[in-house]
Image (cartoon, coloured by chain):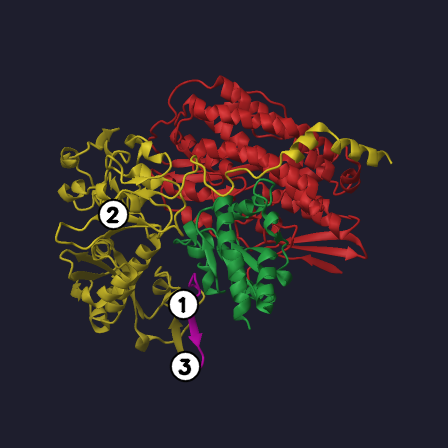
């Protein structure tokens, strides 16, 4: 009974923190476009404030560069449980065009923190990000909340 | 008060009331419109396995060619497979695909005419002007007529060249037509460094022969390539490319070798201040002169300074014809004339 | 006391560390530390063909990504003396101006968000979506379009594309005046922007500020004048103001948008018929070229040998803008909140600015400022 109430609460109010690990900003701009009146993310109860201390979902964008190797784990530890990390775009998954001879990025991001879901595309269209977040996000947090017992 | 009136007036306008009453979610917020260029679609049956799409993809690991297993009905199909977490949706693979109708379709890119496609190939073919004897065998052999005479020199038109390699096979002069590998330049440099270091160590170890050499004499050795072949394959795994790079490098190589006879050294330390990279130093504890091989330029200043002919200077040349044995020839450098005159 | 505005902050889109020296509530000085976004793009492009280099150069920055590809293509065309057909030049102008419109809208909406004025943030983002629709119709993607090639543009456009673009521009113009008046004449915002973050003309020249940030302080430089297409076929006005505070910078960006809309309309009206792409005979050589990106002047220096690129060097406008922001704008600002909004008004694009990373012997990476690098 209590678990059912907790599930409903966790699914309908989600706080998001966008962590830019060193990308080109294309995916960030598409995430900001999600807040515009056309796509309107806030109608689903999702609130984007960039504070890791109060976040439920961490959105990772960008390939992990030299400076973020130590700091990514620290930011992940600051967020309280239950939390999930979602990788947006190709950079945190495979390094995209930067993982070649001459570039230095440490891809993928799942070497450093556990990533629960990934959205492909360079950059993914806002409609793709919306589809993925709504299909996966609330259920994943509710499951993680039950796991933490 | 006036600011309050201003705000009330602004929100009481008809435009605001219209927008408020007609607010609705647009129909396309969760679908992709047709004009958006999505991941490429693959039509398996048209693929001929040429590999142009894998060569021209800007992102590593995004596309690769796989082959199905053979079944009773026929051969297994060869077709490209796209990895969506690395593909950047640029449509370049659809542009360069040579089949008709195309195997890959991405947005509208498959409608681009084929005359604009320059496949970024692994090798670039260039003519060396000094060695070319203008026999024009390559011009006759080229299947797309890419070699022309410009300003009395033979030039390869990179736009037309399809990198088939026939001009390289038919050229009678070794080195006039070059097929330069344009990827993995760092690995090529590492491989050449490995060969040079190995050959120099080999010659330095033959101390008695070097010290007994007369002024007109020659030393000849046969160095087997198998000693470094395993390490070479670790740097560049492709056997054909590795052998070609080693052959080209070794055939042009000319090294200066320095031989240092420690028994004759009287520790006068005159060589130390003259060295331009300060690689010679005197070790107090061991009471010997030490030379740092990594910083030494082999410039011969220490050899010219030393009054006791401790240092000897040699030049070595190499030739690798059959891919197995490096023929080495060592002779004394011309600078050695003075010391042998005693 | 030093207040660090760290890599993750609600007002910042990109990771950067901004250190503010405060005395009580007043902010006296500011320092900027870069280094979080360096990916090594110039080293990857060395030794590759231009086909792969163009897709890498547009991922230097995702907000102003179109202008990077145009400058790259124009530099190689200058080395090889390629004549771009006129229809392709017009299509390039259309996409360039549409990209400028969406970038200015985004910069202004970030400025409003940093002051917590959510109404204008939402209004401006709504207008931006019309411009993004037009770009997607013409090129196939909203960001990182892949539209330019050496010798022209990739595909042709016709009536099916131009009619919806004109309709979208009409929709922007309907609401644009009202949104601009909400900012310029609304009483609350003016108090927070006028007179804050003032940079005089001499300081702008010394700090190498370019683009709309320099033009708001009186520096008269616009690299669209001097470009062969704009000189021959188009005419437009260069917007300039004298005050140099946050209000002037935002209004300069707002005022450039009607100019861009009229340029797109001129281009669609007068576009000639012809082909859009010519084959290019590539030569070896060196060239340098600069163009006007939405944030200022972007310079590309390329050296090629035939088909391959030997050396490339990219200089972006955000280096000078952010440096002059730290040195001259954030000086004696009343509160910390005003310092953050001043930083947001100078339109920072950190991914553009990260060309060099310096590692000291402990393995930590940090760059302090523009002067140390040069």
Q: Position of residue B67 (x, y in %)?
A: 22, 52
Q: Residue B266's spot in the image, x, y percent?
A: 36, 76
Q: Nearer the viewer, mark 2 or mark 1?
A: 2
- Residue B52 relative to residue B16: left or right: left
As drawn, is C326 to the left or to the right of C134?
Answer: right
Element carrying mark 3: loop
Q: Residue at x 54, y 39 (%)?
A: C64
In percent of width and height, residue B236 lies at 28, 58
The residue wearing badge 1 is B271
Distance from disc 3 to disc 1, alpha carbons, whole Å, reads: 18 Å
Q: Which segment is the magenta one?
A: B274-287
Q: Give me the chain that's yellow.
A: B
Instruction: State the residue in front, B99 or C97.
Output: B99
- What shade does chain C have? red
- Which label sits on residue C128? none
Q: What's the magenta bit mostly, secondary-structure-wise?
A: loop
Q: Chain of mark 2?
A: B
Pointer 3 local density, CA inside 10 Å: few below 14, some 14–19, many at least 20: few
Question: Which residue is found at the position 42% from the left and 51% from the top?
Answer: A96
Look at 61% across and 48% down and name the residue there.
A42
Disc 2 target residue: B79
What color was chain A assigned in the picture?
A: green
Q: Which residue is mark 3?
A: B286
Q: Is residue A95 magenta?
A: no
């Amino acid at each position: 009974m209590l678990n059912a109430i907790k599930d409903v609460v966790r699914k309908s109010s989600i706080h998001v923190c966008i962590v830019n690990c060193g990308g080109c900003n294309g995916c960030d701009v598409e995430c900001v476009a999600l807040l515009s009146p056309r796509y309107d993310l806030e109608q689903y109860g999702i609130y984007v404030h960039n504070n890791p201390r109060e976040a439920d979902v961490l959105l990772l964008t960008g390939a992990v560069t030299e400076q973020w190797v130590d700091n990514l784990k620290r930011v992940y530890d600051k967020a309280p449980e239950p939390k999930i990390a979602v990788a947006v775009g190709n950079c945190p998954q495979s390094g995209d065009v930067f993982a070649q001879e001459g570039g230095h990025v440490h891809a993928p991001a799942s070497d450093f923190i556990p990533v629960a879901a990934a959205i492909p595309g360079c950059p993914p269209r806002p409609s793709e990000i919306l589809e993925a977040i709504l299909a996966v996000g609330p259920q994943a947090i509710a499951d993680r909340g039950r796991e933490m017992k | 008060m006036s600011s309050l009136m201003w705000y009330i007036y602004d929100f009481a306008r008809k435009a605001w009331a219209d927008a408020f009453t007609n607010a609705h979610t647009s129909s396309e917020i969760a679908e992709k419109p047709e004009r958006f260029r999505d991941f490429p679609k693959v039509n398996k049956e048209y693929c001929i396995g040429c590999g142009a799409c894998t060569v021209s993809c800007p992102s590593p690991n995004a596309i690769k060619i796989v082959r199905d297993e053979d079944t009773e009905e026929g051969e297994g199909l060869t077709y490209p497979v796209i990895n969506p977490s690395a593909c950047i949706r640029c449509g370049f693979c659809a542009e360069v695909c040579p089949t008709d109708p195309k195997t890959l379709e991405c947005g509208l890119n498959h409608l681009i005419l084929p005359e604009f496609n320059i496949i970024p190939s692994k090798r670039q073919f260039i003519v060396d002007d000094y060695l070319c004897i203008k026999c024009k065998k390559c011009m006759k052999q080229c299947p797309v007529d890419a070699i022309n005479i410009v300003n009395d020199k033979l030039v390869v038109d990179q736009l037309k060249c399809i990198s088939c390699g026939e001009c390289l096979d038919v050229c009678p002069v070794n080195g006039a037509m070059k097929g330069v590998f344009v990827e993995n330049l760092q690995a090529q440099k590492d491989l050449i460094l490995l060969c040079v270091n190995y050959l120099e160590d080999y010659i330095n170890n033959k101390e008695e022969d070097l010290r007994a050499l007369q002024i007109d004499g020659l030393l000849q050795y046969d160095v087997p390539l198998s000693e470094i072949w395993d390490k070479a394959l670790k740097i560049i795994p492709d056997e054909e490319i590795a052998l070609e790079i080693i052959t080209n490098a070794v055939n042009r190589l000319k090294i200066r070798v320095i031989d240092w006879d420690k028994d004759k050294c009287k520790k006068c330390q005159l060589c130390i201040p003259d060295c331009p990279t300060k690689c010679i130093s005197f070790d107090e504890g061991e009471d010997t002169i030490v030379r740092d091989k990594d910083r030494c330029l082999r410039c011969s200043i220490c050899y010219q300074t030393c009054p006791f002919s401790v240092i000897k200077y040699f030049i070595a040349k190499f030739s690798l014809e059959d891919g197995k044995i490096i023929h080495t020839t060592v002779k004394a450098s011309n600078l050695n004339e003075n010391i042998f005159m005693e | 006391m030093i207040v660090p505005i760290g890599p993750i902050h609600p007002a910042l889109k990109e990771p950067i560390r901004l250190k503010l020296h405060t005395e009580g509530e007043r902010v006296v000085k500011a320092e900027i530390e870069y280094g979080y976004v360096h990916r090594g793009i110039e080293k990857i492009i060395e030794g590759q063909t231009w086909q792969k280099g163009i897709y890498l150069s547009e991922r230097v920055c995702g907000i102003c990504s179109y202008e990077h590809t145009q400058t790259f293509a124009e530099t190689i065309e200058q080395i090889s003396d390629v004549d771009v057909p006129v229809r392709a030049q017009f299509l390039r102008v259309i996409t360039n101006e549409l990209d400028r419109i969406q970038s200015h809208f985004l910069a202004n909406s970030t400025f409003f968000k940093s002051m917590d004025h959510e109404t204008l943030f939402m209004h401006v983002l709504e207008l931006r979506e019309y411009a993004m629709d037009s770009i997607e119709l013409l090129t196939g993607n909203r960001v990182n379009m892949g539209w330019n090639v050496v010798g022209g543009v990739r595909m042709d456009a016709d009536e099916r594309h131009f009619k919806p673009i004109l309709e979208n521009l009409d929709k922007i113009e309907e609401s644009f005046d009202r949104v601009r008046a909400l900012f310029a004449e609304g009483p609350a915002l003016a108090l927070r922007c006028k007179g804050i973050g003032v940079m005089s003309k001499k300081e702008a020249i010394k700090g190498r500020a370019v683009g709309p940030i320099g033009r708001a302080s009186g520096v008269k430089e616009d690299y669209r004048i001097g470009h062969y297409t704009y000189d021959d076929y188009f005419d437009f006005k260069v917007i300039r103001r004298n005050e140099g505070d946050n209000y002037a910078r935002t209004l300069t960006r707002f005022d450039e948008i009607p100019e861009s809309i009229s340029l797109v309309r001129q281009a669609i009206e007068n576009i000639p018929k012809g082909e859009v792409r010519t084959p290019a005979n590539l030569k070896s050589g060196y060239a340098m070229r600069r163009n006007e990106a939405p944030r200022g002047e972007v310079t590309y220096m390329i050296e090629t040998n035939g088909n391959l690129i030997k050396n490339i060097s990219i200089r972006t406008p955000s280096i000078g803008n952010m440096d002059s922001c730290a040195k001259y704008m954030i000086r004696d600002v009343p509160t910390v909140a005003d310092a953050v909004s001043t930083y947001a008004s100078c339109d920072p694009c950190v991914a553009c600015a990260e060309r060099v990373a310096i590692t000291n012997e402990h393995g930590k990476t940090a760059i302090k400022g523009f002067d140390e690098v040069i």
